[in-house]
Amino acid sequence: MDVTLDTHTFIWYIVRSDNYKLSHTALASIKNAEKCGTIFIPIIVMMELLHLIERKKVDLSFDEVLSTIEASENYIILPFNMDVLKIVGDIKGLECHDRLIVAAAKLTGAPLVSKDKEIRKLGVFVIW
């Protein structure tokens, strides 16, 4: 099964010592996608990660994260594009970065792995 990850989910997964912050279902879904599916990462997630690294909120090397993603066949970074912009206008009630993440999940058709309760209220297929 394929999945789309929001920012915190992605961070909690790649920082192995933070895996406990993920629900059992979320962790299992990501591991399954890593083995036999695709993990979609919206570009805004990568930008938020970079911002958190630069502010020393997350102890990771951005270059190492990029290298890991590039070396994996299972990770795809989703760019900003016209398809995302066509979807994002219909998403209401969220901050703009969350709207972009939800739009990316809708575009891929892959469930969004997210703990965010506001996103779960939108009727988007969310795994947690």
Image (cartoon, helix red, strand yellow):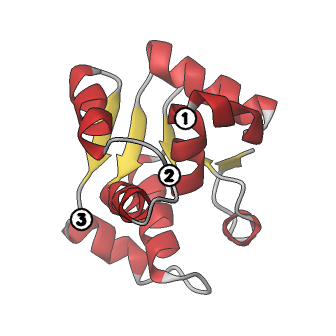
Front one among 122 and 12? 12
In the image, what residue type sits under mark 1? Val
Question: What kind of element bears circle 1?
Answer: loop
Front one among 77 and 60? 60
Q: Residues within 10 Å of mark 3 (few under 14, many from 20)?
A: few
C-beta proximity under 8 Å, tags 2 and 1? yes
110 relative position to 78: left or right: right
Residue receiving disc 2: 58
15 relative position to 128: left or right: left
Residue receiving disc 3: 80
C-beta proximity under 8 Å, tags 1 and 3? no
Q: Position of residue 14 (x, y in %)?
A: 50, 33
Do we see residue 127 in this rendering?
yes
Q: Can you tell which quarter of the image residue 21 is in?
A: top right
Say whether disc 1 or disc 3 marks the residue closer to the N-terminus.
1
Residue receiving disc 1: 15
Q: Residue at x 45, y 81 (%)?
A: 96
